Image (cartoon, helix red, strand yellow):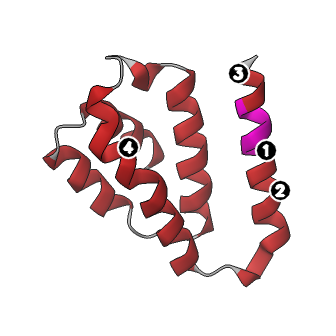
Amino acid sequence: NSAVETQLRLSAFKTFLDLAGNRLTGKDFSEAFDAACFPLTLFSSSFDPGWAFGVSASVIQGLLGMLVEGGADNVNQCFLEASRFGSTELVRVLLQVI
């Protein structure tokens, strides 16, 4: 089941963040946020319309939310870029994270 597999991967990522603890800086989280958000900004308009309401959106929100909790400070930048590129589905997901 892909939903269970995705949940396990997110859980593993959360465990990694917990283990890394204070060895990761806000800059690390910001760079990870960029790495996750940039391709979504460019390609989310080619995804099926309405993807921001399904399991994919929950996974993206979970990942981006963990990065924001860790100290990513570039959420607004991603939001502006997603708006500029017309990635309305990603904007919808980012609004849930902010």
Depicted 72 relative to depicted 46: above or below: below
Q: Which is closer to the viewer, label 4 or label 2?
A: 4
Which secondary structure lies at badge 3? helix
Mark 4 vs mark 2, CA separation in Å: 24 Å
Q: Which residue is mark 2?
A: 15
Give x and y (percent) for residue 92: 34, 34
Mark 3 vs mark 2, CA separation in Å: 20 Å
Marks counted in the figure total 4
Amino acid under disc 4: Leu
Amino acid under disc 2: Thr
Mark 2 vs mark 1, CA separation in Å: 6 Å
Amino acid under disc 1: Ser
Give x and y (percent) for residue 93: 41, 37
Depicted 98 relative to depicted 51: above or below: below
Asked if disc 4 and disc 1 are in contact, CB closer than 8 Å, the reply is no
Asked if disc 3 and disc 4 are in contact, CB closer than 8 Å, the reply is no
Residue drawn at x 59%, y 35% as measured from the top left: 59
N-terminal-most mark, 3 or 4: 3
Q: Which residue is mark 4?
A: 40
State which quarter of the image contains the N terminus.
Answer: top right
Front-most of 95 and 86? 86
Mark 3 vs mark 1, CA separation in Å: 14 Å
Which secondary structure lies at badge 1? helix
Q: Is residue 46 magenta?
A: no
Amino acid under disc 3: Ser
Q: Which residue is mark 3?
A: 2
- Residue 11: mark: 1
Give x and y (percent) for residue 10: 72, 43
Report the magenta residues as a range. 6-11
